[in-house]
Amino acid sequence: MQDSVLASFRSEFGASPDGFWFAPGRVNLIGEHTDYNDGFVLPMALPLGTVAAVRRRDDGVLRVHSAEARETRTITLSEVAPGGDLGWLSYVAGVAWAAGEQGLDVPGFDISLEANLLQGAGLSSSASLSCVTAKAWSDLAEWGLDGDAIAALGRTAENEIAGAPTGVMDQLASVHGRAGHAMKIDTRSIDVEQIPFDLAAQGLSLLVVDSRAPHALVDGEYAERRASCREAALMLGVPALRDVPLDGLDETLGRMKSDLLRRRARHIITDSARVLEVSGLMQDGGDVRRIGPLLNDSHASMRDDFEITVPQVDVLQEALVSAGAHGARMTGGGFGGSVIALVDAGSEDWIIEAAHQAATAHGYDEPTGFVATAADGAHRLR
Ligand code: GAF
């Protein structure tokens, strides 16, 4: 991608960039929607993401070329503010606004962007965009930010300027990713623990299968889940659902008046607990296949209690498990997106083929799949 990004930078801006940066997307192994409930998550960064060629300028102007959007847009940084409607540009310009709020001096930049991560696949293409921007600018404008601060700029851009009320998992994963590792993240303390995740050594692979289901109503549904979780925490008298103990959970939830909020809370509390169980199994050196049933439980919890899956995704998950996956679950925010599956190395092709057949038998779009490996987080390429 670096060559084509360089070519478009030169043709759009008539000069050479100061450097090239990359930030990845992610898959989350388990712990979904737990990040805005102060809970635990277990993502890993992908080798796929966004490459940016960037040159500093000093007139408070931002020019951005996006290969994906096939356009170049120009904006004066002082005009960026919450409540606007910048579309894809908000994930870039929003970083400038977030940095300004932190008292950082934002000089202006020319950027050319190219991504090899599909939008809408639930693999955090937007976090890779905001984080590559924040990382490049921190280096070029000498802000000297650490990983947590870069992730925070990306999240503020998404929350305040793009208007997506996300938690912080995706940005932390995009920044802190490490090859061969998954990250157990405590989203309350922002403690990131790197956990070795070498599937090949155990004869295993992690498949990512994109359902290609359209993301209808994503923003509204996501915000609605956040609101339900807040309401459930209030009802239970805790600062966040993370604070509800797993011991005696049925009894605790039984006291709730609303069945809907009870189910929402049960998903968050049990999925956060599953993160601890899965990371414990990954760390004890035993057979990683043992995490399979927990992946399936997590999917059932998202389907039945949190209600963030769609039929296309449920069909895929079932097909993957029936074809021999040790476990499978939807990954990411939901309402479409991708399913991950833990499979034996060598079985990838026929398991993906089984997923194709199941999807087409239901009249759904043909899913696309790839084998995921854990890669490094945001960094300068050259
Ligand atoms: C999306 C959000 F951006 C994350 O913060 C997280 O809540 C995730 O959905 C669900 O776990 O990716």
Image (cartoon, grey):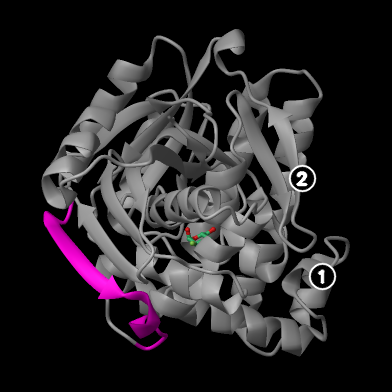
Q: Residue at x 14, y 50 (%)?
A: 12
Q: Secondary structure at mark 2?
A: helix
**328 inside magenta stretch:** no
Please tell me in which quadrant of the rendered image residue 284 appears: top right
Residue 255, labelled with which disc? none
- N-terminal label among 2 and 1: 1
Total numbered badges shown on the rendered structure: 2
The residue sitting at the front extreme is 58
Which residue is at the front of the view, 216 or 192?
A: 192
Please give left or right for residue 22 compared with residue 30 in the image. left
* Residue 272 horizontal/vertical position (percent): 70, 55
* Badge 1 element: loop
User: Image check: 210 left or right of 359?
Assistant: right
Residue 306, image x and y in percent?
A: 53, 67
Identify the residue position indicated by label 2 in the image: 276
Residue at image coords 39%, 38%: 19
Magenta residue span: 68-83
Which amino acid does the dot numbered 2 rest on?
Answer: Leu
Q: Is residue 378 visible?
A: yes
- Residue closer to the observer: 328 or 74: 74
* Quadrant showing the C terminus: top left
The quadrant of the image that shows the N terminus is top left
The location of residue 217, given as percent across then percent down, is 30, 75
In the rendered image, the vertical position of residue 179 relative to residue 182, given as above or below: above
User: For the point 54% across and 31% down, which residue is it?
Assistant: 376
Q: Residue at x 49, y 42 (%)?
A: 27
Q: What amino acid type is highlighted by mark number 1? A: Val
Above/below status of 345 relative to 57: above
Residue 258 at what x, y percent from top left? 63, 87
Q: Which residue is mark 1?
A: 244
Q: Is 130 rendered above or below residue 376?
A: below
> Around disc 1, counting alpha carbons within 10 Å, would you say few (fewer than 14), some (14 to 19), or many (20 or more)?
many
